[in-house]
Amino acid sequence: MGNNYNYECPHPVAIPPAKPLIESIKSGIEETLFPDDPFRQFKNQPASRKLILGLQYFVPVLEWAPRYTFEFFKADLIAGITIASLAVPQGISYASLANLPPIIGLYSSFVPPLVYAMLGSSKDLAVGTVAVASLLIASMLGKEVNPNENPKLYLQLALTATFFAGIFQAALGFLRLGFIVDFLSHATIVGFMGGAATVVCLQQLKGIFGLVRFTHETDLVSIGQLKKGLNPPSVSELAFGSPHLMAAVKTGIITGVIALAEGVAVGRSFSMFKNYHIDGNKEMIAFGMMNIAGSCTSCYLTTGCKTAVSNIVMATAVMITLLFLTPLFHYTPLVVLSSIIIAAMLGLIDYEAAIGLWKVDKCDFIVCISAYIGVVFGSVEIGLVIAVAISLLRMLMSVARPRTFLLGNIPNSMIYRSIDQYPIADNVPGVLILQIDAPVYFANANYLRERISRWIYEEEEKLKSTGGSSLQYVILDLSAVGSIDTSGISMLEEVKKNIDRRDLRLVLANPRSEVIKKLEKSKFMESIGREWIYLTVGEAVAACNFMLHTSKSNNPVTDTVEFDAHDNMKQWKDVNSAYRFILMEEAPGANGGDERPRSSSPKG
């Protein structure tokens, strides 16, 4: 075979150099709150340029306005007029759905789009009233105040809820806490939107069929006189001193989160389709500012819609409608408004997405259908709470009950993979190889200790029943363990004690940076012995195989080798390297059939 062999010394597991506390805290904040590195454009720029970039960052219109061309204007003009023809009756319909005066829906299609055009980062996202937020407002505020008995107070609470929704949305953006919205999973949104759309469609039966009696909750406000004129100021209408203030705050936060999830998701879908980037936190700031401004100008909650238009042109068209055309909508049949709502809602019942969830992930489907059933047969709040609770429970279960895998060797290679995924993988005689597939925290430390003990017990029982080689080594593959806390370290210490009582040896493979630092600081490395921590599973198995090989041979040097393995790291690596050399000499093509020489002479 000549020099065609793989001869490599085992690589030591490096301990990263310690960082100053301030630097560690700074790095942690940057990774948590600034994963997209929004300040990279300011690097190595003069002060004047930084000022311009800062203004463009917070007011995107200053960036794109100088590049705006007449060709863009022609397209925006046509699109704006087209969508305004729908936005006007839709605004009236959705305001009625929220149990608000119809004119409020028109007001909400004027000021918020102008604010978003100045501050938003999406080139294609339209802004207006949406059915789900309207339904939430009607459901949550309707429990506090009857909109028919006290319409003024109800309107004040709706404006106040919009104000707090804007405050909450803007705060999430400024504080870079947009990841909170991610707790509303895709499955939750699909089920919740579908359920809300079903409820809204059922509510429109009154308008479609001319029903006199349906339910108290589904009565729609009749169209009546729409006064001409632009949005009147409504700062004085914000009910900060109302005894129902907490209901308005709760409504604002919940509707604000739902509106953010819907608007940001729609904006991201447009940006992916047209290959440009939007900043989620900037979008939250834009949504928040437009709802704060809207609450002060007689508008209720607005968010992004699935229509690519120029918000400025649309707002201008709505302004013209408010000034001159509102009397024309006095005689709009109720059946028309109901039809508009139903047509919009049918698109929100995404049954194809639900079928896809069933095929791909049954748990996600359960979340989806639970949200749908909760909204349809309970209320929008119940559906939302059920869906979020199930999603959080699933997340907690994945943290508290991480998966562990039994690894085996892929034939003719030094690769070790899950035996469940690769049935052809072979067990290593006398060695149990386990992989932990999650960070180790206080929430899962006890479970992992018990699960590892169970793996060891089951392996020993299997070997006894089959008459195989007795278990000697337990290798923990920590390559998927990104972090560990003190409870996790205590768990490893208890696992080691349990393994020691069984006269076995614990070996660690590929501990990550944060993990090895904490193991070193906690003195666990001294407890297990640095010579029993390896960079790869392959090197750990080679070491264990060598010890098994030497223990089976009646060589008087055996005890010396084992003694040196505990007390002399360098000698142990030399011995391990020699054994790897023997293995490669005896197994041609052990690296997946590749017999090319890796090195013509021994390293180190």
Image: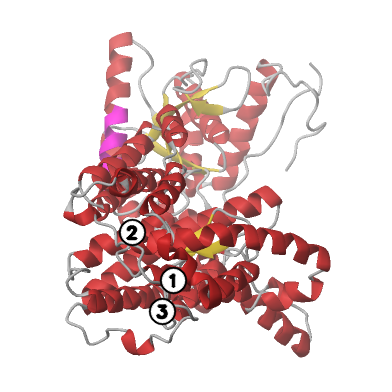
User: Splitting the image into 4 quarters, where does residue 149 fall?
Assistant: bottom left
| Mark pair 3, 2: CA separation | 17 Å
Where does the image place residue 70, in percent across and percent down from the top left?
82, 68
- When the figure is inspected, residue 38 is found, relative to residue 595, above or below; the finding is below
For residue 169, the mark is 1
Label for residue 298? Answer: 3
Q: Residues within 10 Å of mark 3 (few under 14, many from 20)?
A: many
Q: Which amino acid does label 1 sit on?
A: Gln
Let me know if residue 23 appears in the view. no
Q: Is mark 3 on a helix, strand or loop?
A: loop
In the picture shown, does residue 379 fall above or below 165?
above
The magenta stretch is 444-456
Answer whether residue 542 is visible to the viewer in this image. Answer: yes
Secondary structure of residue under mark 1: helix
Q: Which of 205 and 475 is in front in this view?
A: 205
Disc 2: which residue? 97
**Mark 3 is on which residue type?**
Ser
N-terminal of the pair, mark 3 or mark 1, is 1
- Per the image, label 2 sits on a secondary structure element best described as helix
* Quarter of the image that includes the C terminus: top right
Label 1 packing within 10 angstroms: few (<14), some (14-19), many (20+): many
> Front-most of 528 and 220?
220
- What is the crowding at mark 2: few (fewer than 14 residues within 10 Å), some, or many (at least 20)? many
**Image location (x, y in percent) of residue 233:** 42, 87
**Residue at point 22%, 76% (across, down):** 246
Indicate which label's residue lies in the foreground, 2 or 1. Answer: 2
Name which quarter of the figure residue 72 lies in.
bottom right
Most foreground residue, 188 or 517: 188
Which sits earlier in the primary sequence, circle 3 or circle 2?
A: 2
Quadrant the N terminus occupies:
top right
